[in-house]
Image (cartoon, rainbow, N blue to C red):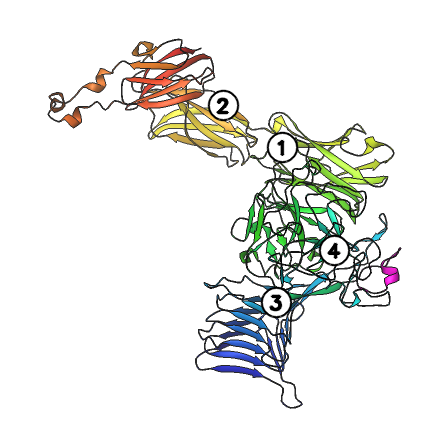
Amino acid sequence: MACSGNPTVITNQNSGATVGNFTIDNTAFTFTGTNSIVNSGTFTAKNGSSINMTSASASSAITNTGTFYAGLSNSSCIITLDGNQPKLNNNVGSANGTFYLGSTSIIYPTSTNCLMTNSSNCKFTLQSDQYGSAAIGSVPVAANPSPSLVGTYNVERYFQGGTTYDAVKKRWVERNYRIISSAVNTGTQVNSNNVYALNYIVGATAGQTTAASSTANAFITGAVGGSTSAGNPSTYLYRENRAISNASFTSGNFIGITNITSPSAIGTSDPGTWSIPVGNGVLFFFRGAATNWTTRTAAPFIAPENVTLTQTGTLNQGSITVKDWYTPSSGNLGYTTASGNSAYNRGFNMVGNPYPSTINWDKVNTGGITATNIDPSIYVLDPVSNQYNSYSSTTHVGNPVTFTGDIASGQGFFVRASGTGAVLTFNESAKTPTTQLTGGNLLMGAPVQQEVAKLMRLKLFADSNNYDDILIAFKSSANTKYNGYEDARDLGGIGALEGLSSFSSDGVPLAINSVPYPKQAPMVIKLSVQATVSRQFTLKRTILDSLPKIYEVWLMDKFAKDSLDLRNNNSYVFNVDLSDTTTYGDNRFTVVIRQNKALGVHLLDFTATKATDGSLISWKTENEEKYTNFSVERSTDNGVTYDVLGGFLSAAQGTYNFTDKSPVKGEDIYRLKIEDLNGTISHSQNVSLTYGSSAQAVASSNINVYPNPTRGTINLAIKPDTRANLLSGIQSLNKNPSLAASSQSYAIKIVNITGSVVKSANSSQPSWQDDVGTLQPGTYIIQVVNNNDKTVVGKTTFVKM
């Protein structure tokens, strides 16, 4: 429905004892005139409906003093606030308005003059459930910035529970740690930062006895203001500049939160009081709802239910630079090189999505997310496997491969500073509000499927609830040493039954290990297999399909003196005995990748023939794949040096042709350069064609090099070619001085004994000088070519002392 022209008002209101009900179902309302919606009854927009405020009039508005459902559960509504100062007003005057933005619904405040207001005596809720989380799209910045989202909002966050029981670790799988964040702030700044509170987690059960009960809240133990101050902390901050320690719950980098009463005075196991700036993450142990306390916090426990928690505050908007909670005045993330801080945890910072919308890590340094001196990988704790999933914005590779760069609203994660001066800034354009993470995908569940090429994935598997994955990514430009822009460290797990990682060549344990394709020598990748119980495990190869066929892949077991061809087998069963350290750890397993020479590219034929349009170069191959590169090279100096005429990537067709359209007079020597995906280079035999008169012998007497031997400077004298100096009558009489100058030009190359050009120059004079003091001692060839007709003027040798 389009509403335009004269003022049109859609009014839905209560009339006496009658409640006004107005519903749009899969309907589009577009307001292009002085139009508005006024609701004081119950207004419902569902099932893909949209409301578009595109009017040029500043009076275009949605005004609600009743109950407004912009979408229902799994039934969306999209609201666009565009045009000239469109408004969404929840509550006007003294009336109370209730506005719900459904769990799969979105508001796009696309106008720089839009205004969304929630008055103090009303309720505006962004809903979340197993189908998704309501989102606010990118908020534009006006010429004179002012908040576009005004008031206090409720932002729900769905936590998935479950009844899956892990018999090995004797726990309910979803009763576990999660890293959380906040899409709202308190509205009051601390240390010039917007901060957020944690008391919403416990809500009505804050500081209560075991008789308190709430299905809309969860537990926090070990903190004043929590459900109970007894027990170990349920919530933790992370401090990069503390050394790793497992002596107690609060002795290492994870700092227990001991008081959540006031957001401006958070108590921790570190001395002092603190606040939590938006953009920081919090580790939270989820037990389910705040009911049945005696069986919720004492063994054998009960299964955690699904719980939807509600944060209340000012919506975070605009650019947000993350400031660590323990250094709130600094815009730099933690990176400590002090002796007490090991290189293993150096630079790690626990951060979080600050917006009421999904964001995507692929927006790094494209305007959405600014990451200065920060590795491109993120690390997200998966509460099911107890492992950290990882994703890189440069390789677009996730581990597991199902993990994309999507980060749900309310979700926290780790980044790693690569040096001092690390700055992380989230911008509105990082938002991807149409990406709805559902069910277990919310708050660190198994993410959305993604396919990635040239990967090998290994999975250490105990059972369906206990496993760990690693990826080995093959890339021609990769390095076997740790590179924070391609690799992702393995952070281990929190109470995980097992652990699997691969090592870079410089000994860094990795979850994503980017390596080059092996050359002629095999590549050996060391694995680490860890376990907390003695039992049988299975090491699975789950992905290998895209690895080029030329490579064999073997799993080597040093303890069992056994091996497994991972090309043709995908499972290896073995036992770990904690009493025997040779059955696990860093020295039992390796992966060996090597070329199968029988499957390498073979050149069957290489020929050169004269054709009407030049020299036709032809060749035939076998086993060549689409990753083999061919280059045709030509020498015009009797094989001393070669120039590349052209080349292309193979098409796996077996037969190829290339035409040299400009062969030179004399002898043209051709050869084929073959470069495989691993950088291995080979050459064909030489074939030659002669054009014009036979090639003249290259006379050393045409050039003279002195001093010879030399330690530094050499001088080159070139005997003039009289053929090039035959002038026309007018030139010889100097009637036109501008034409009398010689047009002679020489190309000069210095070649070492391996045939590589170490210096090259051009000269228009028959004399030339250069400093060769930086060359290695030895014998060198110096060659001069006439640039006009590409003939060799002369070549000789000199000795560098």
Q: What residue is shown with label 2?
A: 683
Quarter occupied by residue 399: top right
**Residue nearest the viewer, comparing 254 with 735:** 254
Span shown in magenta = 289-304
Viewer-proximal residue, 237 or 359? 237
* Residue that carries the numbered disc 1 in the rendered image: 481
From the image, which quarter does the C terminus lie in? Answer: top left
Depth check, mark 3 against mark 1: the one in front is 1
- Callout 4–callout 1 Cβ contact below 8 Å: no
Q: Are marks 4 and 2 in contact (CB under 8 Å)?
A: no
Gap in Å between the C-alphas at discs 1 and 2?
A: 30 Å
Q: CA distance from mark 4 to mark 1?
A: 41 Å
Q: Amino acid at mark 1?
A: Lys
Q: Which residue is mark 4?
A: 267
Looking at marks 3 and 1 on the same chain, the residue that comes earlier in the sequence is marked by 3
Please state if 382 lies on the left or on the right of 87 as rendered.
Answer: right
- Label 1: few (<14), some (14–19) or many (≥20) C-alpha neighbours in 10 Å: some
Q: What residue would you read off at disc 3?
A: 105
Where residue 465 sits in the image (x, y, percent)?
Answer: 79, 49
Q: Is residue 445 visible?
A: no
